[in-house]
Image (cartoon, grey):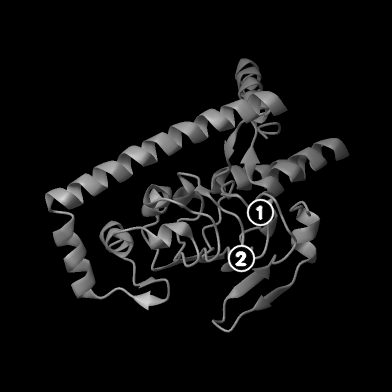
Amino acid sequence: MVKLTPELINQSMQYINPCRERELDLRGYKIPQIENLGATLDQFDTIDLSDNDLRKLDNLPHLPRLKCLLLNNNRILRISEGLEEAVPNLASIILTGNNLQELSDLEPLVGFTKLEAICLLINPVSTKPNYREYMAYKFPQLRLLDFRKIKQKDRQAAQEFFRTKQGKDVLKEISRKSKMSAAAAIAAEAGNGKGKGSEGGRLANPQDMQRIREAIKRASSLAEVERLSQILQSGQLPDKFQHEKEAVAQNGAGHNGSGAVAMEY
């Protein structure tokens, strides 16, 4: 297994793919989890994380340029909610050969309003009853599912099915399982956080990233530069960092604002 570090990202192959998009190749490193993608500085249209050892799709920083994620042949069994805020322009996600089990496991993808192509071949979920109908119903903008076109008649048939009592019962069951999965995930992450001494935090937005870059320019020590650079590369603002920012802002306000700007990040 290889940790996904900023150094690995910078050393990996980068090229213009046949679709004339800028692509980052992170295939085959057996990476166990997604991290440090902020080090890409949002310079890629496609990121290929196929043939790794990912079990969860999460921890994506703000990458508005990213349009395609290739995640073939991992072990992904869960997709975190809220990822559409990090990659709002995602149009294609390829998840062939993973371990997504239930239709409820796909609910976090519904928030991606620009998603036009999804592939879930060789996932247990793709063999579930009403799979294609559910995808056509929940993703009105979806054009390709498992490399097969979703036709207008397919979408209409799906809408009609989910208006029936049977269809409504199916949706209720999926919703119930989705809520149970989300609750279990929150509990697991809380437990992991306590066990590892996690600092918590949130994803950095574009304004945060710009302020961090400005703070690096103003930094007065090498240690401060390194700390800010690590935060910039990870794309994650730790809670400790947020508390420092608030404390400095309060101190600055008590001195007519002096020093607050220089130490904001």
Please name whichever residue, 214 or 176, is drawn nearer the observer in this view of the structure: 176
The image shows residue 146, relative to residue 124, as above or below, that is: below
Locate the C terminus and report the quarter of the image it occupies: top right
Q: Amino acid at mark 1?
A: Leu
Q: Amino acid at mark 2?
A: Ile
- Name the residue carrying label 2: 47
The residue shown at (41%, 62%) is: 126
**Mark 2 nearby-residue class (10 Å; few <14, some 14–19, many ≥20):** many
Is residue 37 visible to the viewer in this orientation of the structure? Answer: yes
- Mark 1 and mark 2 residues within 8 Å of each other at the beta carbon: yes
With 103 as the anchor, is 258 left or right in this view?
A: right
Say which quarter of the image contains residue 134. Answer: bottom left
The image shows residue 193, relative to residue 5, as above or below, that is: above
The residue shown at (71%, 49%) is: 233
Which x, y percent locates residue 260? 65, 28
Disc 1 to disc 2, how far (Cα)? 10 Å
Mark 1 and mark 2 lie on one chain; the one further toward the N terminus is 1
Which x, y percent locates residue 148? 37, 77
Please name whichever residue, 252 or 76, is drawn nearer the observer in this view of the structure: 76
Please name whichever residue, 88 or 102, is drawn nearer the observer in this view of the structure: 102
- Name the residue carrying label 1: 37
Q: Secondary structure at mark 1?
A: helix
Locate the N terminus and report the quarter of the image it occupies: bottom right
Which x, y percent locates residue 212? 67, 43
